Image (cartoon, grey):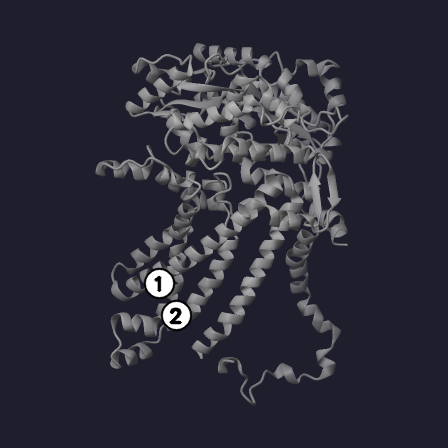
Amino acid sequence: MTTALARGVLPMLLSAAIATPAVAGEVTVWSWFIQSTMEKSIAAFEEKHPGVTVNYTYYNYSPEYITALKAAAASGSLPDVIGLQPGSLTQQYREQLEPLNDRAAATWGADWADKVFPVNKKQMLMGNPAGDENYYIVPQESQVLCIWYNRKIFEQLGLTVPATYDDLKAAAAKLTSAGYIPMFQGAADGWQNENVFLMIANQFEPGIVEKAQYGEAPWSSPALVEAMGAWKGLFDDGVFQEGALGAHAYPTGAQLFAQGRVGMMALGSWWMQESKFPPPLSEFVQDMAGFDFFQLPPLKAGNPASPPVGGIDIGYGLTKNGADNPDAWTFLAELTNGVGLQQALNDLNDLPAFDGHAPQGDISEHVQQLSARFMEALPKAENQRFASPAVAEALDNALAGVAAGDLEVAAALASVQAATDKALGR
Amino acid sequence: MSTLVQPTAGTAPATRFRPAAVRGRPSHYAFVLPAVLLFVLFIAYPILWVMGQSLYAESPQTGRSFVGLANYLAAFQDRTFWLVLRNMLLWGLITIPVQMLIGGLLAYAIERHTKRLRGFYRTMFFLPVVTSVSVVSLVWVQIYAPYYGIAQEYLRHLGITISSSLIGDSTFAIYALIVVNIWQWTGFSMLLYIAGIANLSEEVLDAAKIDGAAGWRLATDVVVPMLAPATKSLLLLGVIGTLQTFPIVHLMTGGGPNHASEVFGTAIFKQSFILGDTGMGATLSVIVLVIALALTLVQIVLLGTRFAAVRA
């Protein structure tokens, strides 16, 4: 009876009290997407579609956004359009989301999915039950991971882009002795640790993490064991700053990096957006004049440098509540592959998810070159995302445990294997 | 039982003598209906709902299924659960007495030994309580940061270099967070003790002084017992606050590294909202509820009568 009440009566009461009734010509949107950029996208959309108003609600991602989504889903009061990450977040709300295949084909043509970069297309289906080929998320932006470096500091210290691990260690040592933070790692954030580990693991065997998360290779594979050892080396060899395990990438690391107190930092293509933030901007951030990027050099002699790793930065889903509102899909389409997207690209928020777009407007030649290099890498990118949040969480804990010296590599990887087996129902 | 709660003959509440006809009139129940409805809707129903959820497992792959008490068994077999329990125990055992002690000493010093700047000191020590937890967390992350942190900037002048982060060390992370919690909430303990000290009977204090009590003796034998109601309130609030701990841990360490600073709040949040396992999140919530209930009953049984007797 309790369950019946929980699933029936109370949600109905709550949704009646909370949900905004559908109003003709109005679209409701929730996301963690930066508000100033979203407002530009909405303005462009409303100009193109007079008579339609978009009400956007911005949330911080964690804990506000994900708790708001959960509560709204339970009470049946989700807005028309919601921001999503591929994989676990999308899968959590799959029951409340509309399949978008037919709408997308009607708007963009039957071959629309071929215009989505391959890694994004793979992530759009990530976590779907076997046989479910529906797309519940349309990506808006992509990202490519990389190591950004302060080229002014490098120039001042006579450093060049590291080509080997010895170069990287030497650069870190020189930066440290000059009073700079060598490579800032916000190792208190699981996502930044995952990103660096993916860069490393793909050096040893491209696609190995992808195979391991789907049970096609064991987490005890030699490539992953070596990658985990190399990860620990970044802490032990002074490449990362002292105390990295207690540091956060945002806001601490990003602020220090922007201020010119950090030599290198593992981020991604989204770092370009700093140059579009409201002034005052530091001399390094202005037009990205102080920054350039490289892929992590091989941590083991004989290996290649990290291949590009990336995928969907953010995407959007159409909820069941928004399914009957034709303006909701129109907005979602413009936001992901139309006038709304263009505004986001002009703000250098990140890379497009669909081929055929580029930032326009007041953008320096240096930034244009950076953007072009990322776009060149994007079609070749390895997958950055995890289908199961439990596997990602287990990997986060394993990485932190190994880095702290609390866990041996084998034990750490065994815990990830256990989480993977459980997630796969083995 | 305390004489305070014993009704005196002839002064018992008149309601006890209401005629049965009046007492049972259905319309009288309407007066309590709004309160009962609010209680049922916002307290009883959510508790029952969470209890119901704890009997189900849910995953995007397998959907929702009834699992009985399997979530409880899984929780008790999980190493992280016992780590969380240990952390909560440390949190309560350290923060509650330390906050009381420092808060009490501050209150006594401010109320008894300051005059002109009393308001200033009260405000300064209470300031952390009204400061946003987000701000407090950001500042303390910077304080703890080695190499480039706030504390390091000062210690550099003494030739000291902090070479590791307390919140990044699995052994010390929980203690580092406890320090932040004490820093933020000691002002609240101080405020309650200030209220208690302000209400101390001057006659009793004067009588104690005439009897020769002064200084430490006056404080421990007279003032402390007379502040028992404030102490009891702080104990109750401290236990509740401990079980509700979330924002400081979430913002500073996220429960890491590798669960080292995990508390019930962050564990429930992760299970429910990050991992999407609502059943396990609900299970942990029910366990917290049971612990809270048990601790409250223990306090009422052990401390309730004792403090009532002291008051009498």
Quarter residue B10 falls in: bottom right
Q: Residue type at mark 1: give it.
A: Gly
Q: Are marks 1 and 2 on the same chain?
A: yes
Residue B302 is situated, as x and y percent measured from the top left of the image, at 50, 71
Residue B201 is situated, as x and y percent measured from the top left of the image, at 35, 76
Chain for disc number 1: B
**Residue to which mark 1 is pinned:** B104
Q: Write the residue at 32% across / 60% down.
A: B106
Q: Nearer the viewer, residue A157 or A397?
A: A397
* Depicted A147 relative to depicted B155: above or below: above
* Depicted A326 relative to depicted B14: above or below: above
Q: Residue type at mark 2: give it.
A: Leu
| In-image side of A210 versus A261 (left or right) | right
* Depicted A113 relative to depicted B272: above or below: above
Q: Nearer the viewer, residue A91 or B10?
A: A91
Residue B210 is situated, as x and y percent measured from the top left of the image, at 25, 81
Question: How far apart are the two marked residues, 1 and 2, measured between alpha carbons?
Answer: 9 Å
Q: Nearer the viewer, residue B93 or A107?
A: B93
**Residue to which mark 2 is pinned:** B227
Image quarter in which the C terminus of chain A is found: top right
Q: Quick one: label 2, few (<14), some, or many (20+) residues within 10 Å?
A: many
Residue A141 is situated, as x and y percent measured from the top left of the image, at 58, 21
Q: Secondary structure at mark 1?
A: helix
Image quarter in which the N terminus of chain A is found: bottom right
Q: Write the residue at 40% across / 18% down.
A: A149
* Depicted B244 relative to depicted B18: above or below: above
First in sequence: mark 1 or mark 2?
A: 1
Chain for disc number 2: B
